[in-house]
Image: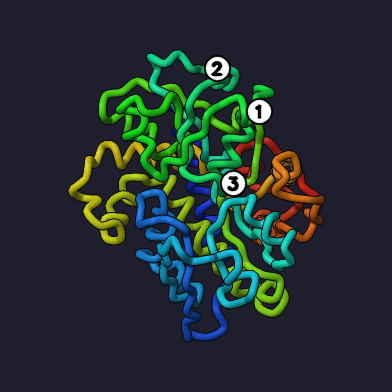
Amino acid sequence: MKKTLSKILTLLAAVSLLLSACASQPASTQLTDVSLPVGYIPNIQFAPFYVAMEKGYYRDAGINLNMDYSYETDAVALVGANKLPFAIVSGEQVLLGRAQGLPIVYIMAMYKDFPVGITTLKDKGIQQPSDLAGKKIGVPMLSGASYIGLRALLDAAHIKESDVTLDVIGFNQVEALSTGREDAAVIYIANEPVQLQAQGYDVNVMQVSDYLELVSNGMITNEETLKNNPDLVKRMVQATLKGMVESAADQNAAFEISKKYVENLDKADAATQKNVLATSVSLWQVEKPGYTDPQAWENMQSILLNMGLLKSSVDLNGAYTNQFEINYIKTCVGNGYDIDDITGKKSQRNF
């Protein structure tokens, strides 16, 4: 275990150095104001942004970042209309948006594993998706990543939505489970299960990524920004990735920095919040920072087609890009080797 941890920390340190060496420098000292919708309240899970802001990585990249936590922000539409240059959204929103003609592009993955799952109290005896048949399941809403994750787990067990009872409960999963109102609840892996365990409950968690790889939350931009200002995109992505890699490598420092940005974080149960951060780190895309898996896009499109949310396939080639992840690896490592080369795997990629 100690050797594995040491290897991971060494990898993270090496990646951080690569990001530092390859960071683009803005043409002038004038900062570009960027408002970034993230679709949730201030939370320890956004530590990468807080670290990057506090350590000046956005400023060094010529960016003045403002985090937008408002739920009502229609981030996909605003980015698609080029009213905003960036947003953090769940992967299915990219395909649904492009199907509606919005020219949005996914440019940076935050997670390697889809962060949604279904949790139950252990005494319910629900251990795998097939056990969900006939059960009452709480879901935040009948849309978004939570709903997509639910359908993926049901599909894995060949269970139809009509074979379960769905109850829209908002973000009250902890209460719904602890009071016995629901047999199971759709959750974010790094959030509700950690809270339940902190309250003394034994839980089972079925993680979507154990059954199917889907596109997780990440950063989007639009085709116009990609075409006319690719350097801004590159600087935004790399400053964020540096914050993510450093947050993963030094979680205690990331937690302390986040206190400035998350109200009452220092007054909350610190152990629980640190566990939320640690669980988030385990899901982040830190070994290949920013990289998104093409197969996950194929899987996501199949799920959306099966659900009827997509009427026909969209061109996946335009929906996402790994060009920024590849560009800095090529510049820094050279010889066609990607970040896996740091671990000695010598996995070569053609540029």
**Relative to 82, is 203 on the left or the right?**
left
Residue 216 percent across, percent down from the top left = 59, 46
For residue 258, above or below residue 103: above
For residue 310, above or below residue 105: above
**Relative to 39, is 199 on the left or the right?**
left
Q: Which residue is denoted by mark 1 in the rendering? A: 160
The answer to whether residue 73 shows anywhere in this view is yes
Q: On the image, which quarter does residue 52 sit in?
A: bottom left
Question: Which quadrant would the C terminus be assigned to in this image?
Answer: bottom right
Disc 3 to disc 2, how far (Cα)? 25 Å
Label 3 vs label 2, nearer the camera: 2
Going by the numbered disc 2, the residue's amino acid type is: Asp
Mark 1 crowd level (few <14, some 14–19, many ≥20, 10 Å Cα):
few
Q: Which residue is denoted by mark 3 in the rendering? A: 216
Disc 1 to disc 3, how far (Cα)? 23 Å
Task: Pick whichever of labels 1 and 2 is earlier in the sequence.
Answer: 2
Which label was assigned to residue 17? none
Question: Which quadrant would the N terminus be assigned to in this image?
Answer: top left
Task: Pick whichever of labels 3 and 2 is earlier in the sequence.
Answer: 2
Q: Are marks 1 and 2 in contact (CB under 8 Å)?
A: no
Residue for point 31% across, 49% down? 255
Q: Which residue is denoted by mark 2 in the rendering? A: 131
Residue 218 percent across, percent down from the top left = 57, 54
Residue for point 67% across, 29% down? 155
Residue for point 39% across, 32% down? 193
Residue 343 percent across, percent down from the top left = 60, 38
